[in-house]
Image (spheres, helix red, strand yellow):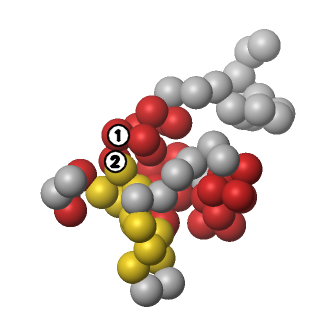
Amino acid sequence: MDLADTVDTKEAADMLGISTVRIKQFISEGKLTPLRRVGFCWLFARADIEGLRGRPGRGRPAKGTAI
């Protein structure tokens, strides 16, 4: 896999609109599998992160959205 096809923890969090702490929770819950660890940061397949983007989130709907 080419490095262009990977994203680090911060990039993954930004893409998903969540915190890096939540990314680490996803890893521990088995919802996300990192490719490898580089220093203090995890690398993920870009396709895996993009796959998570399409999933509906749990919790409260965004403000201003109809149910």
Name the residue beneath numbered marker 1: 47
Checking the image for residue 30, the label placed there is none
Q: Of residues 3 and 30, which is closer to you in this image? A: 30
> Residue 17, how many percent across, how many down?
56, 50
Q: Name the image quarter holding the C terminus.
A: top right
Three-letter amino acid code at the position of disc 1: Ala
The quarter of the picture where residue 38 lies is bottom left
Q: Is residue 42 above or below residue 39?
A: above
Q: Position of residue 40 (x, y in %)?
A: 50, 84
Please give left or right for residue 49 compared with residue 57 in the image. Answer: left
**Residue 41 drawn at (x, y percent):** 47, 76
Marks 1 & 2, CB-CB < 8 Å contact: yes
Residue 19 visible, this angle: no
Q: CA distance from mark 1 to mark 2?
A: 4 Å
Above or below for 36 versus 54: below
Rendered view: 55 above or below 37: above
Across and down, in percent, residue 45 comes to 36, 50
Residue density around tag 1, few if under 14, some if 14–19, many if 20 or more, within 10 Å:
few
SS at circle 2: helix
Residue ID at (52%, 52%): 33
Is 18 left, or right, of 50 in this rendering?
right
Please give the residue where the numbered disc 2 appears in the rendered image.
46
